[in-house]
Amino acid sequence: METPLPIHRATPAREAGRTGSAMRRRTTHPGPDRLVRVGPNAFVRAVDWDAAGPRTRYVTRVWARLARLGEPAVASHASAAALHGLSSLYGWPVQVHVTVPKSRYRSSSNGLVLHTRPLSAEDVARDGSLAATSIPRTVIDVALTGNVRAGVVLADSALRLGTPIAALEAGLRSSPGTRGRRVAELVLELADARSGSAAESFARVVFRELGLPEAVLQQEFVVDGRRLFVDFWFPEQGVVVEMDGRAKYSQPRYLGGRSPTDAFVDEKRRQEALLTVPSVRRVVRVEWRDLLAPAPLAHRLRAAGLPCAVRPGPSARLAVA
């Protein structure tokens, strides 16, 4: 599971500077000794917190809360997804999600959301003292909340990490009750390990909402001996759709040691190479923000020759029978 930042707690021995009141005071003082409170009696160094990314910060909050809650509490839903290194459509929340026995149920409060669906031994994964729902159970829990977009992003991520689709299907079959089941079935129907990122997973759902024909994922083209893979290929229309955005030209994981300028030029040359393929008529670039407001996107896709059977409203969603 994902590793948290070093967590510091007040000591019962009342060591100098380690009492609860002393550590809380350090959260308001500027300077290198400043602390950030991440849970009850749980603090991290501000310098570590400021340098950490959103997932690491959230994982730290989860570890801090779970250690305090004790053995019956199991991290679940978004919290388990973060711990397992899965993708999230909406980023990471402030609240920690925990599944507890019904007999231990109390109303959710203070940044804690409690769930009471029963857990089997196979539903729980452990990392030392920390327990979280397994990857299949986590995917099913999120899918059952009724959000197809979030469910597909999470399911695709699980498949990319090596979880077989059969394990997700078995998890749904063993899940009690019927609430949200049709949405979960649709999520598993749409799930595909070939989606290379959360953005590609999100785009697939939006394309389906717009009524586009099914695309070929990660289609390979060979140009002058160079293998080029595209995110979405619509062969009947001769249209390539590529996910784009500032991250591709600014984040180290995409740059591969190149400068942002070099990355931009390489991508431009790559597109020019794709357009030399006789079957490729158009290349359309889509950003994350386009997926959030699909009406203008649908207009662009139609202009490129793709049939969009659905005219979206401001917040179109995939209909579930």
Image (cartoon, rainbow, N blue to C red):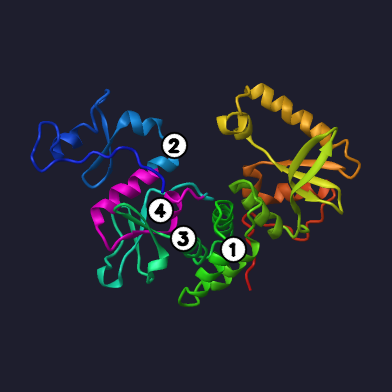
Label 3 secondary element: helix
Q: How far is the residue under mark 4 from the one under mark 2?
A: 15 Å
Q: Amino acid at mark 1?
A: Ile
Q: How far is the residue under mark 2 from the one under mark 1?
A: 30 Å
Q: Residue at x 41, y 41 (%)?
A: 56
Q: Residue at x 62, y 43 (%)?
A: 289
Label 4 secondary element: helix
Residue 85 part of the magenta segment = yes
Task: Mark 2 vs mark 1: give the one in front.
Answer: 1
Q: Position of residue 177 (x, y in %)?
A: 47, 77
Q: Position of residue 24 (x, y in %)?
A: 19, 37
Q: Amino acid at mark 4?
A: Ser
Rendered image: mark on residue 53: 2
Question: Magenta stretch?
Answer: 58-86
Q: How far is the residue under mark 1 from the one under mark 4?
A: 21 Å
Rendered image: mark on residue 79: 4
Q: Amino acid at mark 3?
A: Thr
Name the quarter where the C terminus is drawn. bottom right
Disc 1 target residue: 165
Rendered image: mark on residue 138: 3
Label 1 secondary element: helix
What secondary structure characterizes most of the magenta part?
helix
Viewed as shown, does residue 98 lie left or right of 192? left
Q: Amino acid at mark 2?
A: Gly
Q: Position of residue 151 (x, y in %)?
A: 55, 59
Q: Categorize mark 1 by other alpha carbons within 10 Å: few (<14), some (14-19), many (20+).
A: some
